[in-house]
Amino acid sequence: MNFRIVLLLVISHLLGDFVFQSKYILKLRFEKTLRKNVKGNTLHVLIHFVLMLIILSSCKVISIINSSISFKYILSISLIISITHFFIDELKTLLINFKVGPQKNIWIFLMDQIFHFMLIIFVVYGDKLTFSVNELRNCPKNINYIDKSLIIIAVFLLCTFASGIFIKQYIEYMNFKNYNKMLNKNYIIVGSAKELHNGGFIIGILERSFILLVMAIGEPAMIGFVLTAKSIARFKKLDDPSFAEYFLIGTFMSFIVAILGGILIYALKIFPIIK
């Protein structure tokens, strides 16, 4: 049951950090003024707190988690995680504001996410962590249908929304200075003002969703369709060697993330395999 609570909290975290974080809050979180960035991180953490309460309480009501788990327990772990989340994010803000530079942002991003996931595990398991590690040796044999479904939701959010942010951070890390115009404040956007707003990000989500699906049903050969469609759409721009390098790096990173996620979903044997 603790494993299921961890999964629900991970889903809540991914929703709060990558789906329900508005541009206004994101901008406010990284203001130079302490009062403003504290306000931004407070609003951000409140969203996380509300999401945790809603998700855990709803799952208790519909018996996805054990009815013996009290609302007091749900409130307490939500508070502990939210308060600690605030301090982790405020530290991240201060580090970025001290001019660590875009090249180091990817490491701050990765460490930030690792700390958040570790926090969830330690809060839920506490001194029972050793036992939970032993349980993982029997995965996925000892995972039931509900847990498998929650894993799929978490993998989907991680491979679509979260990976879009990571790829953007990695492109900055690679120091593509000549292509700063391709990067907006949140996601990779390639093209002119005539193109769809956030088109690159939307295409990325659809691309990785498609790959996850075809991998899950055992049809990896269909991935070639995505690469063909992307190549046709960007055919003229591929004449620029620099753009071609950028395009290939972003595409292959996106494919690798989605394929790995698809392999995990396939291993859970929850989708019918097409033969």
Image (cartoon, helix red, strand yellow):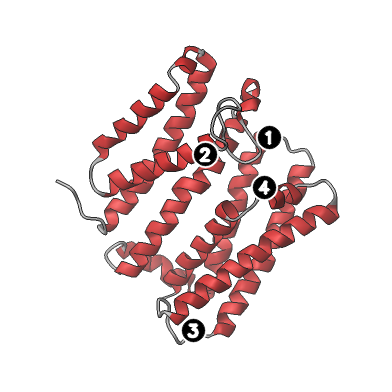
Q: Is residue 143 visible?
A: no
Q: Is residue 140 visible?
A: yes
Disc 4: which residue = 23
Spot occupied by residue 57 in the image (x, y as percentages of width and height): 52, 77
Name which residue type carries label 3.
Ile
Of callouts 1 and 4, the N-terminal one = 4
Q: Is residue 47 left or right of residue 33?
A: left
Q: Is residue 212 above or below residue 52?
A: above
Q: Is residue 68 above or below residue 3?
A: below
Image quadrant of residue 122?
A: bottom right
Name which residue type carries label 1.
Pro
> Pointers 1 and 4 in contact (CB under 8 A)?
no
Disc 3: which residue = 69
Look at 40% across and 39% down and name the residue there.
207
- Residue 149 is labelled as none
Of callouts 3 and 4, the N-terminal one = 4
Image quadrant of residue 81?
A: bottom right
Disc 1: which residue = 102
* Mark whose residue sits in front, 1 or 4: 4
Of callouts 4 and 2, the N-terminal one = 4
Residue extending farthest left: 275
* SS at circle 4: helix
Disc 2: which residue = 201
Name which residue type carries label 4.
Lys
Q: Distance from label 1 to label 2 (Cα)?
A: 20 Å
* Mark whose residue sits in front, 2 or 3: 2
* SS at circle 2: helix
Q: Distance from label 3 to label 1 (Cα)?
A: 43 Å
